[in-house]
Amino acid sequence: MAVAKKAGRYCEGLQLSSLASSILCWKWQRRPAVVVPWTAICGLMLFAVGLISLFTGHVASDLEWYSQRLVKRTWYYKLDKGNHAPVDIWRSKFSNFYFACSERGPHFAPAVRERLSNGYLLIATSGGLNQQRTGITDAVVVARILNATLVVPELDHHSYWKDESDFSDIFDVDWFISYIAKDVPIVKRVPENFMRSMEKPPYTMRVPRKSEPEYYLEQVLPILLRRRVVQLTKFDYRLSSDLDEDLQKLRCRVNYHALRFTKTLRSLGQRLVMRMRKMAKRFIAIHLRFEPDMLAFSGCYYGGGDKERYELGEMRKRWETLPELSADEERSRGKCPLTPHEVGLLLRALGFENNTHIYVASGEIYGGEETLAPLRELFPNFYTKEMLAGEELKPFMPFSSRMAAIDYIVCDESDVFVTNNNGNMAKILAGRRRYAGHKRTIRPNAKRLSALFTARDKMDWSTFARKVKSCQRGFMGEPEEMRPGRGEFHEYPSACICQKRSKYSVVNKDKGYRNLDRFLNVSEPEYESDEDQSENRLPKHKNGSTGNRTVSITMAETDHDDFLAD
């Protein structure tokens, strides 16, 4: 009604010059009043409040990341914006800005004495060597949370590989105990007199994956205080990736310092590294992970017909909880490991020469030498631990974990490490290499590379190489790729890597400080190599096509108790 009265006053004030204006005002005066219900008004207000809350929530969650990115990291990327410096494929130009920092904080209390602790914590790990390594690392942290004495963890003897190795067969147990002594008391076994005094056997339980510290305090600690000895079984990824800084630093001290391989394994591993260095100043280590078990787990198809489908299908049955998968969909999502041929094409496209020396860390390759032939053709200087060690390797061959430890040592010492999936060895080594100075670690961008490999024969080599370099931006192991909250902590140990206090200089061991004028953030990366790849023509595999296979199993997305792990 108020609207109609207002319209009437407005029309009275007009000098109507036409019949149309008169009709317009008459209709406006006859227009019924619009009544807006209070429910609609309240709904709009709530909707507006919801939008504001959503926006401010995103801002709050990203505030720390953006502040670190803009304040702590970007200052050296913004120098010389207009200059497109090439990316060094062998090492990061920005690695010297960072250093490992896993020391105990000033408020991190010393370890409690064994006799004053809340009891003994027994740990039964699960999986292969590197999955067990994550379990051991987290076991130390859980013992710290519970104020418990940790008993040296028991390794898994019932996994896919049936390895009978004990902790002391792989790791230097005395070094492990002494290095962590200031953080957590560790013993080799529960004292016999204590065990005899117990009225009941140790209480056994399995905690959910990625449990928060509060879960251990609320669910495990009361049992530990009552029973005095508790065993946690299948202990792999049973602790949250996101912990407070002091506990994250403890993780790093365990993983990167306390877990040292036995002298026998270290000696053989270092001999293999020296043999690689004698042949070439620098070399690439590739973790192919193209074994039958991995391919079966992935649910992917590689063109082997009914024989391949039957063999991998039968092997896949051991994981009862795995869903039915579409091989084509998995490939398009980037969940299929690259073939050895595709790994070789990726490296050649990035700029690594045909005479580059490569070390291949792998078990039994599905398809054997026929599958490896294209990679050997692309990189004739091809070596494995079996080729380098010969008879020295025989004592270790019955034990998959010890063989994996040798590969681990050589991959860790390599100039460039290339992963072919997102499994445990790939994550553990990627994190360790970041901690050791952001040593170049290349992870295929599987999702984008999938379509590129499919269309490989429809483009010339220079176009293919350019597209590969574009795909791999952000997957080359640069310091900028690591930010708080990204991925598993074992792969991105951000709490243990600090930035040097330096304004416009970078430390160089030989030349001291250098000016940063040539360092910049590249919008379209170029890659430094020893030959111009744009004019290089690769030898083509006799079968012609590379196929359409691609990369990467993600641990978080395939979370099964009996996860096949390396």
Image (cartoon, rainbow, N blue to C red):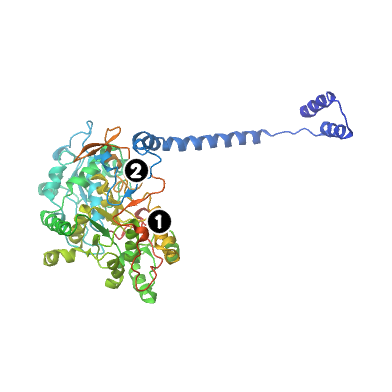
Residue where numbered disc 1 is placed? 466
At x 36% / y 70%, what residue is drawn? 313
Compared with residue 190, is residue 272 higher up or lower down, i.e. above or below? below
Quarter assignment of residue 240: top left
Quadrant assignment, res 330: bottom left
Image location (x, y in percent) of residue 544: 38, 71
At label 2, counting other C-alpha atoms closer than 10 Å, the crowd grade (few under 14, some 14-19, many 20 or more) is few
Say which amino acid is labelled 1: Arg
Classify mark 1: helix, strand or loop: helix
Q: From the viewer's side, name the closer residue of 364 and 535.
A: 535
> Could you tell me how far apart the alpha carbons at marks 1 and 2 are, in whole angstroms?
22 Å
In the picture of the structure, the residue carrying the numbered disc 2 is 480
Q: Nearer the viewer, mark 1 or mark 2?
A: 1
- Image check: 239 left or right of 25? left
Residue 205 visible in the picture: no
Q: Tag 1: Cα neighbours inside 10 Å, few (<14), some, or many (≥20)? A: some
- Asked whether 17 or 92 is in front, the reply is 92
In this rendered view, identify the residue nearer to me: 62 or 129. Answer: 62
Instruction: Give the x, y percent position of residue 398.
Output: 17, 66
SS assignment at label 2: helix
- Nearer the N terminus, badge 1 or badge 2? 1
Q: Residue 396 location in percent, x, y?
A: 14, 63
Q: Return the mark for residue 151.
A: none
- The residue most toward the bottom is 306
Q: Quadrant of residue 253?
A: top left
Residue 470 coordinates in the image, percent (x, y): 40, 53
Residue lying furthest right in this view?
19
Quarter of the rendering occupied by the N terminus? top right
| Apparent side of residue 515 relative to residue 534 in the rendered image (left or right) | left
Q: Locate the C terminus and report the quarter of the image it occupies.
A: bottom left
**Residue 341 vs residue 250, the one in the foreground:** 341
Q: How many marks?
A: 2
